[in-house]
Amino acid sequence: MEMRVREALADNTSVDLTQLRWIGGAMLGVAAVRPLVPFEFVPPCPLRTLTGIPCPLCGMTRGVTAAVHLELGKAVFLNPGSIVAVVLTILILLAWRTKRVKIPVWVFFVVLGLMWSWELFKYATGRAL
């Protein structure tokens, strides 16, 4: 069992950048106009709604919006992953000739773990989510 887990974490996953370019471009576009929309069109986090505990992605929509509008301190506070998402999106859009990249599987787990640690820290210390 332990050997299978190690092998799985050592694997690489191939990511198609063509689809990510479209998704990233849409993310940046929505974040640019989101403050102009008079109503909130993003549904609330299901985990936080049901349990009160934030998920690793809580704050990403507001964080990406803040990052796109260069409110970097606010973006980091809401979710540091929002800055990473914006920077990676810009890099992917600039590297338009690159079709695919291979990413080690463990990177996904580490990033989600760090993001959730931040959200749980804010939750435990009573900071606004």
Image: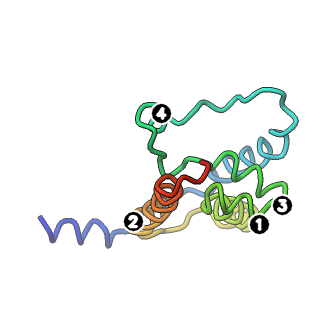
Residue 3 location (% of width, % of height): 15, 71
Mark 3 or mark 2, which is nearer to you?
3
Q: Nearer the viewer, mark 1 or mark 2?
A: 2
93 or 121: nearer the eye? 121
Real-space CA distance between mark 4 and mark 3, rounded to the nearest whole angstrom: 28 Å
Residue 46 shows which numbered tag? 4
Q: Residues within 10 Å of mark 2 (few under 14, many from 20)?
A: some
What amino acid does circle 3 point to? Answer: Leu
Give the residue type at disc 1.
Answer: Leu
- Spatial CA distance of label 4 from label 1 is 34 Å
Contact between marks 2 and 4 (CB within 8 A): the answer is: no
**Nearer to us: label 2 or label 4:** 4
Q: Earlier in the sequence, mark 4 or mark 3?
A: 4
Marker disc for residue 94: 1
Residue at the image position 62 percent from the left and 49 percent from the top:
128
Name the quadrant of the N terminus. Answer: bottom left
Q: Tell me residue 75's x, y (percent).
A: 71, 58
How many angstroms separate mark 2 from mark 4 (CA)? 26 Å
Q: Nearer the viewer, mark 4 or mark 1?
A: 4
Q: Residues within 10 Å of mark 4 (few under 14, many from 20)?
A: few
Residue 89 in picture, x, y percent from top left: 69, 59
Q: Secondary structure at mark 4?
A: helix
Q: Which of pointers 3 and 2 lies earlier in the amino acid sequence?
A: 3
Using the image as rendered, state which of residue 85 and residue 76 is in the foreground.
76
The span from disc 1 to disc 3 (Cα, nearest Å) is 19 Å
Residue to which mark 3 is pinned: 70
